[in-house]
Image (cartoon, helix red, strand yellow):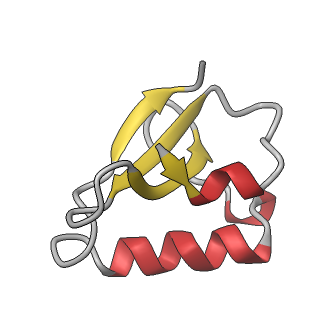
Amino acid sequence: MDLVSRACPPCPQAAFELRFASLFHPGRGVAVPCDATGQVNLDALSERLRSAYFGARAMVGREYAHPVVRPVH
């Protein structure tokens, strides 16, 4: 996927990511580091990724699919 989170350095403690897939552009979306329950540490995100996360969260159902928690490979 072409994800916004690739521009942010990965958080070392994050073994999972919360992914918001684009509804209109296959392979695009937003992914942020999270824990196994989908909780995101906002303080650990860059300003750009935090903004993308809030934007994706606000556009669920209109631009992005409901987020999915996935293990980071």
Q: Quadrant of residue 15?
A: top right
Residue for point 53% across, 69% down = 53
Residue for point 75% across, 57% down = 7
Residue for point 22% across, 67% down = 24
Q: Position of residue 41 (x, y in %)?
A: 67, 55
Residue 39 shows up from this direction: no
Residue 66 placement, left or right of 47: left
Instruction: Work out which quarter of the rendered image holds the C terminus and state it.
Output: top right
Residue 52 placement, left or right of 27: right
Residue 39 placement, left or right of 63: right
Most distant residue in the top direction: 73
Residue for point 25% across, 71% down = 60
Q: Is residue 2 above or below residue 47?
A: above
Q: Quadrant of residue 48?
A: bottom right
Q: Position of residue 45 (x, y in %)?
A: 75, 62
Residues 24 and 70: in front is 24
Q: Is residue 22 above or below residue 3?
A: below
Q: Position of residue 61 (x, y in %)?
A: 16, 71
